[in-house]
Image (spheres, helix red, strand yellow):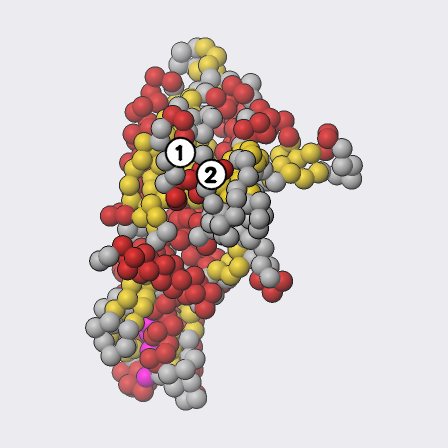
Amino acid sequence: MKSTEKNKKEDDLMEKIVSLCKRRGFIFQGSEIYGGLGGTFDWGHFGVALKNNIKQNWWKKFVESRTDMYGVDAAILMRQEVWQASGHVAGFADPMVECEKCHSKFRADQIQVETSNASGDASRLACPNCGGKLGEAKQFNMMFKTHVGAGEDSSSISYLRPETAQGMFVNFKNTVDAFHPKLPFGMAQIGKAFRNEIAPRDFVFRAREFEQMEIEYFVRSADWEKYFEYWKGEMLDWMEEVGIDMGKVHELEVDKEDRAHYSSRTVDFEFDFPFGKKELFGLAYRTDFDLKQHKLEYIDEEAKEKMVPHVIEPTFGVDRAVLTILLSAYTEDDSGEEMRSYLKLKPNIAPVICAVSPLLKNKLELVEYANTKVYAPLKAEFGKVAWDDNGNIGKRYRRQDEIGTPFCIVVDFDTLTDNTVTVRDRDTGKQERIKVVDLKKYIQEKI
Ligand code: ATP
């Protein structure tokens, strides 16, 4: 395929995903009815369900099923001293250039990459928007600043956290005092992070408000390499578990000059997005940088000495995980009469496990059977069960395919006499008759 054709196909794919997300109630533009607020998104019913499944799966694997991990849910607003100590006030900035003509703003390093500018001087490039002259690059701090309390002086400055990590470091002592963990052990947190990105783009990939799932794993300094490798493996396992297309995941050893100020080694997991190969998740060796900055230490009972543990940090962006899972799951099947698109989501990640339909919505006996004998017991068992009686059966299948529902169950006239229903498989389109009494077991086995 020629590269222009490939680019067109990839652009189309992003458009299809964005439009499916809106049409089927996954993700909407933030503040949409007032013209939208750049870099913010509102999540609809199925988007929340998908996101919750991803977060729950992560929490189960990395916190609940382990004995060495402690959960945290820290405040989003933190004192400015936290961000002074962490280095974010001084250094959490991206280089910004502004067009002198149309005043559009860009991240200098991004347009350099995109235009492969050999001189590396952003001011010599033309504005991608209007072709005008770009000004000098300036450092732009990406933290959202606000004031806590009624006074608006410098002592009341606070920041919305740009990473969840510091919420764990500042609770290191509390966690050690409350639980007395032995090294190695970790802290884990899922929560919102905020970055005033210069150029939010590519749907939820680069947003100004997003969620992170992060782990700070504390080790003895001599062990850092062993645990770095260990966490690389754990991260890859999880990606596969939630249905990310592993053929499109690449590891990038990040060069020293591109690493965050706290990191001595970083491996980025990149994904082949339709808009290019970009960072999906990251793994960093933060050394003892953060704990030292916060003047925190640990008493190593084995060695009977005070020490500062070193930190391995696996970090996952929830929104990038959602986008990647959607892109990995999106499938088009043109073998039938009309093209069918569906989300081949893993059943444990899909927002709906099964949809229940009476064949005809105006036949009371079908509706009653479907509701009381199929829908209600399945709903009580699995929760994520949808009732769908809108339009004809073909339309319902198309809708559920796009939501990624693995099974559609239809109650028809035969059901009333033989107590069996049709179960249609999303991926193959195949239908089989299953006894109503066996439905729970059937679905349980599949998930
Ligand atoms: P990028 O280079 O793409 O700006 P980063 O290296 O600054 O990302 P980290 O600071 O390592 O990102 O953040 C950890 C994770 O948080 C990323 O791997 C990504 O999954 C997610 N993330 C970071 N910035 C954003 C954003 N603006 N929107 C959505 N997710 C983000």
- Badge 1 element: loop
Earlier residue among tags 2 and 1: 1
Query: Is the stretch drawn in magenta largely helix, strand or loop?
Result: strand
Which amino acid, mark 1?
Ser
Picture residue at 41% right of the left edge, 29% below the top: 259
In the image, residue 335 above or below residue 352: below
Which amino acid, mark 2?
Arg
- Badge 2 element: helix
Q: Which residues are magenta?
A: 408-412
Tell me: 39 left or right of 239: right
Question: In front here: 7 or 89?
Answer: 7
Give the image location of residue 333, x and y in percent: 25, 69
To which quarter of the image does residue 389 belong?
bottom left
Picture residue at 59% right of the left edge, 29% below the top: 89
Q: Which residue appears farthest toward the bottom when viewing the image?
A: 363
Q: Is mark 2 within 8 Å of ligand 1?
A: no
Label at residue 119: 1
Rendered-image quadrant of the C terminus: bottom left
Tell me: 442 left or right of 168: left
Residue 55 in the magenta stretch? The answer is no
To which quarter of the image does residue 338 belong?
bottom left
Label at residue 124: 2
Crowd tier of the residue under label 2, counting other residues whose Cα lies within 10 Å: few below 14, some 14–19, many 20 or above: few
To which quarter of the image does residue 395 belong?
bottom left
In the image, residue 61 above or below residue 304: below
Tags 2 and 1 touching, CB below 8 Å: yes
Residue 409 in the magenta stretch? The answer is yes
